[in-house]
């Protein structure tokens, strides 16, 4: 029988792509999401993509009663935990909300899992836990450096999970530190769809290419990088989704906990991203160099060998494919329709 997986935050950007990958790998998946940063229409599109009904619970990860009844009903074998708040600047303004959802929500989920005897979890962490790293490409051994409350919640989440596995070896934990997810599913049915002005580079460039925003502000060209602009390790969201399938297989297979970076090991500057998006969209992307953005890191690039060694994870998709799939999604009929109840992040 197919193993049963609870996918928290499964209606969101990375969660929805991971849903498709998990179903393709033969898992029986239930999505739990409160839709505070997702469109309900994502569920219809997942049904279209997979050709099967989606099992979905509209609930908050902080709601222990609902969680416990879901576990009783489905007897999950593992949880892939995406549900979190993720906007860095918002976390500086409203740290308590971030501690509540990202830390209390995690603890609540772990308590319910423990009571239900389900002790396998894949956790969404982030390169942000490295702060400004001493070394690039950055290995998993680099020290924790919180730059803002959001980053602190990811560090705390990892520490909670590590102390839990140390205390009780029945727990199997996969901690995945994502670098910069980008792109969309090739079907153009799901993708990243911020309703507000986007914080992140790729969705911002996409809206400039589409003519919805006038120009990109390039935050600084005086970093110690080849062209002076910030360098990041962009990873196709479908590659990232596959990383979760491999992590889950490792936990449910030999029960080995692991901590890995998920990135390509290659960096691209802001200006390289603009050039790549112009090629993919065949549109102009006007930009202007402005001041550095407060709290920005000059370079984030993953040391990517550990994920390959432990999980057999290797990225397959190129930067041009990230841009092309993003453009197909942004220019397609589904993007920005049927907004959720609140502004999307
Ligand atoms: P997203 O906002 O698109 O997805 C998160 C989902 O969780 C949304 O569908 C939202 O409605 C849901 N959610 C939020 N609070 C909830 C709650 N209290 N109860 C139930 N559901 C709730 O974000 P994403 O980009 O898909 O990120 C997924 C995970 O990956 C997050 O944990 C994020 O911190 C982490 N991450 C993201 C990035 C990135 O750049 N996108 C990078 C590193 C790590
Ligand atoms: C990338 C590069 C900017 C926008 C953030 C979070 C991090 C993670 C991913 C979750 C940088 C430059 C950007 C713009 C620009 N999220 N830029 N103009 O900063 O690597 O990471 O999102 O874990 O925690 O901090 O991503 O896409 O915002 O920026 O010049 O309008 O693009 O300066 O060099 P970042 P980003």
Image (cartoon, helix red, strand yellow):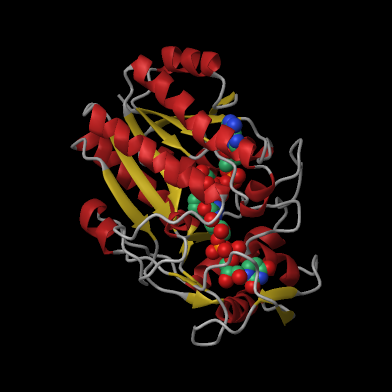
Q: Position of residue 60 (x, y in %)?
A: 59, 26
Q: Quadrant of ligand 2?
A: bottom right
Using the image as rendered, state which of residue 72 and residue 88 is in the foreground.
88
Q: Is residue 214 left or right of residue 29?
A: right
- Dividing the picture into quadrants, the one containing residue 11 is top right
Q: Is residue 300 left or right of residue 195?
A: left
Q: Position of residue 63 (x, y in %)?
A: 56, 20
Q: Is residue 338 left or right of residue 98?
A: right
Picture residue at 69% right of the left edge, 77% below the top: 291
Picture residue at 22% right of the left edge, 53% below the top: 310
In the rendered image, is residue 21 in sight? no
Using the image as rendered, state which of residue 150 and residue 66 is in the foreground.
150
In the figure, 292 relative to 224: above or below? above
In the figure, 247 relative to 252: above or below? below
Using the image as rendered, state which of residue 43 and residue 299 is in the foreground.
299
Which quadrant holds the N terminus? top left
Q: Position of residue 26 (x, y in %)?
A: 36, 36
- Dividing the picture into quadrants, the one containing residue 71 is top left
């Amino acid at each position: 029988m197919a193993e049963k997986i609870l996918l928290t935050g499964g209606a969101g950007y990375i969660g929805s792509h991971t849903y498709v990958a998990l179903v393709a790998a033969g898992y029986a998946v239930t999505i739990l999401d409160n839709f505070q940063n997702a469109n309900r229409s994502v569920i219809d599109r997942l049904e279209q993509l997979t050709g099967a009904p989606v099992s979905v619970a509209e609930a908050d990860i902080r709601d222990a009663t609902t969680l416990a009844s879901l576990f009783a009903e489905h007897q999950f074998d593992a949880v892939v935990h995406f549900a979190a708040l993720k906007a860095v600047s918002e976390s500086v303004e409203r740290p308590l909300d971030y501690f509540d959802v990202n830390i209390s929500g995690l603890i609540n989920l772990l308590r319910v899992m423990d009571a239900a005897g389900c002790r396998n979890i894949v956790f969404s962490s982030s390169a942000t836990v490295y702060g400004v790293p001493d070394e690039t490409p950055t290995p998993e051994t680099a020290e924790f450096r919180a730059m803002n409350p959001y980053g602190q919640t990811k560090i705390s989440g990892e520490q909670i999970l590590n102390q839990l596995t140390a205390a009780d070896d029945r727990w199997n934990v996969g901690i995945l530190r994502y670098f910069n997810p980008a792109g969309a599913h090739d079907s153009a049915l799901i993708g990243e769809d911020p309703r507000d002005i986007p914080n992140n580079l790729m969705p911002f460039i996409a809206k400039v290419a589409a003519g919805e925003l006038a120009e990109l502000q390039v935050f600084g060209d005086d970093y110690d990088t080849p062209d002076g602009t910030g360098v990041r390790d962009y990873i196709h969201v479908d590659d990232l989704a596959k990383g979760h399938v491999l992590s889950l297989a490792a936990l449910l297979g030999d029960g080995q906990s692991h901590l890995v970076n998920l990135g390509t090991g290659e960096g691209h500057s802001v200006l390289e991203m603009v050039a790549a998006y112009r090629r993919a969209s065949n549109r102009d992307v006007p930009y202007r160099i402005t001041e550095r953005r407060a709290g920005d890191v000059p370079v984030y690039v993953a040391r990517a060998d550990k994920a390959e060694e432990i999980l057999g994870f290797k990225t397959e998709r190129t930067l041009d494919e990230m841009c092309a799939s993003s453009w197909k999604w942004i220019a397609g009929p589904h993007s920005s329709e049927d907004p959720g109840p609140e502004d999307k992040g």
